[in-house]
Image (cartoon, grey):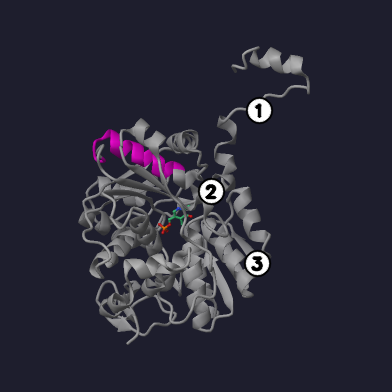
Amino acid sequence: MAKMKALVCRECGKEYPTEAIHVCELCFGPLEVKYNYDEIKTKVSRQSIEAGPKSLWRYQDFLPIEGKPTVGLYAGFTPLVRAHNLGAYLGIDELYIKNDCVNHPTLSFKDRVVAVALTRARELGFETAACASTGNLANSVAAHAAQAGMQCYVFIPGDLEAAKVLGNLIYRPKVIEIEGTYDDVNRLCSEIAGERQWAFVNVNVRPYYAEGSKTLAYETAEQLGWRAPDQVVVPMASGSLLTKIWKGLNEFKTVGLLDAVNTKVNGAQAEGCSPIATAYKQGRDFFKPVKPSTIAKSLAIGNPADGYYALKTVAESGGAMDAVSDDEVVEGIKLLAQTEGIFAETAGGVTIGVLQKLAKQGLIKRDDVTVAYITGNGLKTQEAVVDSVGRPYRIPPSLAKFEQTFGQQGEA
Ligand SMILES: *Cc1c(COP(=O)(O)O)cnc(C)c1O
């Protein structure tokens, strides 16, 4: 029997074949991949995983593909960094940064979801890859499509950072800027997906795409020495990543790779686009769509597809949600850079800002083993910090001038 059983509606439970479909025809609920865990259990062990490739494909048995991976062979297995300095500053003894700033090949966590989505898309016979993106997804789809020899169309909002626009064009896909927000982009892509036989990774192939996010949970557990953390802090755009970290940890428990999962899952957003965190704070289990206005553009989804499930996950795990201002996002980016030497993008500033708030409020305690997910690279969002980091010293190539500036002892 195959490990992938069916696609199943998250609302009414109706099952579908594992094709390129994403919405239930009965209740319009989202579809998700259902696995045969008894089958998976007989195939995997801690040893078999440890002997696997140094990429997310070491967890292939938990991913929704039938054959061998063909796209994104080097994505994942990024460092889990023990953050001694930041931990000391925040009063958390065992703090880790899961560093997807250095993911391969496009420096964000999206390389995980795209590796899985496009491997599956090719299995299903698609020749064209496409996506609706807040920035990082387009970069990753464009890069992977180039490598895989697929046609590629990426759709982005018209106000993205320069590096994220260039980070598409260099691979030569069709880049379509939409005069509107991500939510406008997404709506248009849903319409186009109905017309064209394309693999829109986060529309018609979304059930497979979303599974790639689970690998962040698997890696965390393995890199912690096969334990689940006590607390995780996860940035939210659509909310999908957060729900899949929870799914991944619980799958490891189901098949016996983890003894226990007592992880509190915490969600982070920017105040300028915080529909999910606002619903949490107001005690609602549904969110109200917003019009985004924040420097954290990668998280700027005003009508988040998985917002409802993110709220459910946080409630189920006993975690919390919070939001930070754009100034706090910048402070968070600088704090991580200056304590741990990691230059994250704005989403990372959101995560660090919320981590700091949760620690201050006592929701994350000193002895909680805590993992913060840093999902994108700061070189892609330079606009956010360029005006608040000062300028280099500029002197002629003269020892006298150097000493005049820095003093005989070399102190600045
Ligand atoms: C896409 C993205 C996320 C979160 O995505 P979800 O839609 O919530 O799964 C987080 N960080 C960065 C940098 C991203 O690009």
Circle 3 sits on which residue?
Answer: 173
How far is disc 1 from disc 3 in space, using C-alphas?
37 Å
Circle 1 sits on which residue?
Answer: 392
The chief SS type of the magenta part is: helix
Q: Which residue lies furthest to the right in this view?
A: 397
Q: Is mark 3 within 8 Å of ligand 1?
A: no
Circle 2 sits on which residue?
Answer: 377
Left or right? Give the position of 375 relative to 163: left
Q: Do the residues labelled 1 and 2 touch (CB within 8 Å)?
A: no
Residues in magenta, as a range: 349-364
Residue at 60% x, 53% y: name it.
164
Is residue 397 covered in magenta?
Answer: no
Above or below: residue 79 compared with residue 407 = below
Of badges 1 and 3, the one in the foreground is 1
Of badges 3 and 2, the one in the foreground is 2
Q: Are marks 3 and 2 in contact (CB under 8 Å)?
A: no
Could one spot residue 390 in this view of the protein? yes
What SS does tag 1 mark?
A: loop
